[in-house]
Amino acid sequence: MSNTILSLQNVSIFQENTSILANISLNVNHGEFIYLIGKTGSGKSSLMKTLYADLNLTEGEGTIVDFDLRTLKESQIPFLRRKIGIVFQDFKLLPDRTIYKNLLFVLKATGWTNQNEMDNRIEDVLDRVGMLDHANKMPHQISGGEQQRVAIARALLNDPELILADEPTGNLDPQTSVEVMEVLQKINANGRTIIMATHDYALLMKYPAKTLKCEGGQIFEVVQKTI
Ligand SMILES: Nc1ncnc2c1ncn2[C@@H]1O[C@H](COP(=O)(O)OP(=O)(O)OP(=O)(O)O)[C@@H](O)[C@H]1O
């Protein structure tokens, strides 16, 4: 098996015909933790969206968790999304149902049918993020940090090889950010690859890792002291 989980070659990314990132190349190996930084509007979210096929890849070559982004068909997107866990800044939990039912909804939507297996899986992922005791609460009954833990649990449901986290601590206070980061670190220590877009330089300093910066339509690796 190749050690590469993500490869982009000479990729250009557009939003409504405007070039956002031009002719970029990057390679991510299994098990890496990668930060993606850069000013507002520099293209971090556009890159993330390309990786989870919310934006079509129209220029260059890209493969991710063994899917070819250039030739990916609409019908393959659900299968790609099962191998990628996505975590957003604003959690995106369904407000009208409990934590348990939020997770059940995702399992059913991704093809699970056996009730015992679904219950075991939900218990497992909630336990991993320390939220097992909150399964029957509604999203509004838990804090932002707890909602983000649940969102991470949701991303883990299908045991993805790669987690894409787009500013996962953007709505959290510094202490809660550290707690959520500890969860992501643990997931990475268990062998999962994580790409995390962030503006939180305090976290970068506390948890050093390979850092890629979007700037001027390009993406390049930076060493921490020059950030
Ligand atoms: N749906 C869209 N339609 C048109 N233009 C868009 C769309 N989404 C983003 N853009 C533009 O693409 C550029 C890159 O935006 P993007 O969201 O990728 O940046 P970012 O680095 O993630 O910013 P932030 O740190 O604020 O999240 C910006 O100029 C933005 O206005």
Image (tube, rainbow, N blue to C red):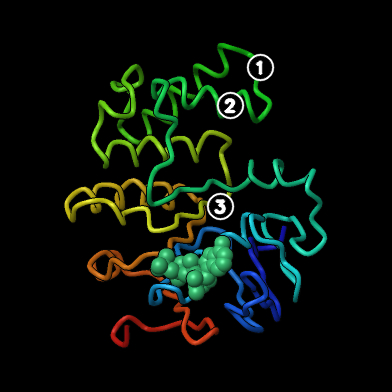
Q: Is ligand 1 closer than 8 angstroms to the Cβ of mark 3? A: no
Residue 168 visible in the snapshot: yes
Q: What crowding class fits label 3: few (fewer than 14 Cα within 10 Å), some (14-19), or many (20 or more)? A: many
Front residue of 29/211: it is: 211
CA distance for labels 3 and 2: 18 Å
User: In which quadrant will I find the N terminus?
Assistant: bottom right
User: In which quadrant will I find the C terminus?
Assistant: bottom left
**Residue pointed to by mark 3:** 162
User: Image check: 142 left or right of 85?
Assistant: left
**Residue pointed to by mark 2:** 107
For the point 65% across and 30% down, the residue is 110
Sequence-wise, which precedes: disc 3 or disc 1? 1
Question: Could you say which quadrant of the image residue 222 lies in?
Answer: bottom left
User: Image check: 61 left or right of 203?
Assistant: right
Image coordinates of residue 198 in percent, x first then y, are 37, 65
**Residue pointed to by mark 1:** 113
Q: Is disc 1 in contact with disc 2, using a CB cutoff of under 8 Å?
A: no
For the point 32% across and 68% down, the residue is 199
For the point 59% across and 48% down, the residue is 84
Residue 35 visible in the snapshot: no
Q: Amino acid at mark 2?
A: Leu
Q: Amino acid at mark 1?
A: Thr
